[in-house]
Image: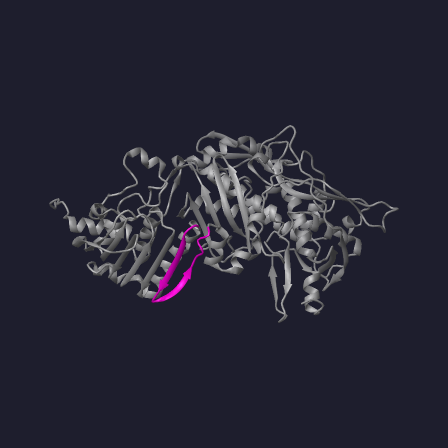
Amino acid sequence: MAEINVLSKDISELIAAGEVIERPASVIKELLENAIDAGASHITVEIKNGGTTYMRITDDGCGIAPEQVPIAFLRHATSKITSKDDLDNILTLGFRGEALASISAVSKVELLTKQKSDEYGTSYVIEGGKEVSNEQSGCPDGTTIIIRDIFFNVPVRRKFMKRDAAEANAIISIMQKIILSHPEIAFKLIKDNKIEFSSAGDGELYSAVYGVYGRDFAHDMIPVDYSENGITVKGYIIKPLYSKSNRSFQNFFVNGRFVKSVTCSTSLEEAYQNLIMVGKYPACVLMLDVPPVTVDVNVHPAKAQVRFSDEKVVFSCVYFAVKNALMASGLIYEFQLKDEMKKRIDYTAKPFEPEKFEQQKIEPPEKKEESAFAPVSDSEYAAVSEEKNDYETVGKQEETVFSSSVMQYGNSGRVVFAEPAVAIEYSEDEEENEPEEKFESFSYINSSAFVKKEEPETVTQPEREQITVIGEFFKNYIAAQAGENIILIDKHAAHERVIFEKLKAQNCGGDSQLILESAEILLAEAEYNAMLENRETLVNMGFDIDFSHEPFVRTAAVPVILESLNMDEVIPEIAENFLLNKQNPQTHRLDNMLHELACKAAIKANDKNDIKELQRLAEEVYYNENIRHCPHGRPVMFTLSKRELEKQFKRIV
C-alpha cells in the first residue's frame, strides 16, 4: 500500500485554486462580487489579451484597512461570516473567503486600497501565494487590483485556456450578468485599450437590459411583477415572436446573484408552452427575491448554482409570474413600414414605458359558456379523422357564442380552460346589421385560480373598438378594420388555435375507457408519491390508477381520447409533470395529438368562406386575449396603423 502523505501548502493551494479559478472570467467574477459587496457605485474593468496577461478592476467602495490587507489573502478569510448561523442568511455575493487566496496562488497580484478615513492607502504585492511587498502608498479611495500572467506557475492549466477572443467573450458574458443584477452600479469594460461597453448605473433594470443587449432586444420585452408565498419575481421576458434559438439569453438572479437553475428554466418554458415554435426558447431577465433561509448558495465552489428548500414553490411562482405577464401584454404585433420599404415587426408604435406598467390580477369567472364555433362533438371527431372540414356548416349557424380560453379550476377539481369572453349574437332581423357586443370577464392566471372559491372576484373587460372585416386576400388572410388600425389575420392559424383550446378544455374529464389487461409500470419513488398525492386529479382527468404495488402502478381506465396512446410512455410523463409541479399535467404526446386534430379541423388556405364566417372568426380572435399564436407558436394576427400608412404616402412626416 502506498504511503499516505499530507500535501504541502503550495500544492494544496493550487488544487484549491482550481476549484474556484478556471479561467480569467472566473477572476473577474470573484473580484466584481467583492467590489459590489464593498458598496461600490462605479466599477471599471480593464483586460488585455483576453485577460491572460493583464486584468485590472477598480472600484470606489469602502476599501481595506492597512492591517487587514495581508489577512484578506489568507484562505477562508472573510468579513461576511462570523458564526455558523450566518450561513442561513447570506445576503452578500462573496462569503467563502477563497477568492483572493485562489487568485494569488496562480497569478501575480498587485493591490492598491484606501479607506475614506485614512490619509494614505496600501500597496500590496503577492505572487504565487507568496508576499512580495507591503507598503504605504498614495491612492484614491476604494480598491484597485491588478492581476498579471494568470497560471504562470501552473503551465498545464495555461495550456488548456482558449484563444484570447474566446476568453474575452467569457469575461463580457460574466459582466453582462452582473450589470443586469446590479443596475444601480455604473460599470465600464475596457478591452485592449478600447471601451467595449458601459452601463448607466441609474438603478433601472430596463436601462441595464438596454445597455447589455441593445435597443431591439429591450423593445421586445414584457415586464413581470408578481409575488406569492414570500417570493417576489420581477424583471422582463421576451415576446413569444422574438424567442431565441438557445437558452443563453435566459438570466435568473436569486437575491442579486446570477444562477443557473433548472427549476426556473423549466418553469419559464412551461409558461410559454404552445406560444413559441419548436426549437425556440424564451429569453428573460428575472429577479427572484427569496427569503435567505429558504435558499442554499453554498452548493457550488463558484456559487453558480443554488438549492431551494422547496423547489415546487419557486417553480409555481415563476410559472404564474410569466403566465400573468404574457396574458396581460395582449401580444398583438404591429407592422411598422420603413421608408426603405423594408417591413419590420414591432410590438407597438409607442416606446415602452416600464414605469407605467401595472399588473392586474383577475380571478376566474364563475361560469363558462359553450362555444359552437369549434367542431368538437363526438360525431365531429370522426369527421376530423377523415380530414373533413365542417367549418362552413358550423359557421352558418344563426346564433354563435364565442369564448375566451383561460385556465381555471373546474368544478371537478381539475385544471381546465374556461370559456367566457365575448358573446356575439345575431338574429334574423339583425342579420345585416352590426353585431351586438357583450363583454364578460377573462382571467389572469395566478395560483389562487386553482383554488375553488364560492364568490370569485371579477373585473369587467374594458370596451374595445368594433372590428369589421373588409375582405380576404391571397385566399388565406383576413383584412379587417378596428379603430385606426388595419388587422391582418391568418385564418387557418387563428381557427386552428380556437379549435385547439376547445379540444384541450374538453379532452379529459369525460368518458373513460376500461382496460382489461394492462402491464405494471415502474416509477421512481418520487414519481410514485407525486402520482399518489394527485390521485383525485387523475380521477377527474378520467384515469383509474391502481397504486397497490408500490412503486408500480397499473392503469385500469384511461380517458377515451387517450386510448390510442401507449400508457407505458404517457403515465411516466404525467408522473414527471406532477413531480415538477406542472399546473397542467397533460403530456407533450397529448398536445401533439390535439395539434393534429385542430390542424385537420381548421379551415384551410384557399377555402371559400363568406364574409359572415370571416367576421365571426375575426371577432373570436380579436376579442380573445389568449388567441395570439397558433398551437405551433406562429402569430395569428398583426396590426397596421393608420399613422404608418400615412407616413408611407407622405401625408405626414
Give the image location of residue 134, x and y in percent: 18, 53
Reply yes or no: does residue 480 show up in magenta.
no
- In the rendered image, residue 233, in percent from the top left (x then y), is placed at 49, 43
379 or 423: nearer the eye?
423
Which quadrant holds the N terminus? top left
Which percent across, then down, holds residue 54?
Answer: 28, 62
Q: Nearer the viewer, residue 435 or 414?
A: 435
In the depicted structure, whether residue 198 falls above or below residue 268? below
Give 496 or 326, whichever is nearer the viewer. 326
Residue found at x 32% / y 49%? 34
Q: Is residue 239 visible?
A: yes
- Percent x, y for residue 135? 18, 53
Write the residue at 61% across / 37% down.
408
Residue found 41% across the figure and 45% down from its top? 256
- Left or right, residue 157 beside residue 353: left
In the depicted structure, whether residue 200 falls above or below residue 519: below
Chain part drawn in magenta: 184-202
Residue 352 vs residue 42: left or right? Answer: right
Quarter of the image for residue 404 reads top right
Instruction: Answer with the quarter of the image where residue 172 lies.
Output: bottom left
Q: Is residue 82 above or below residue 112?
A: above
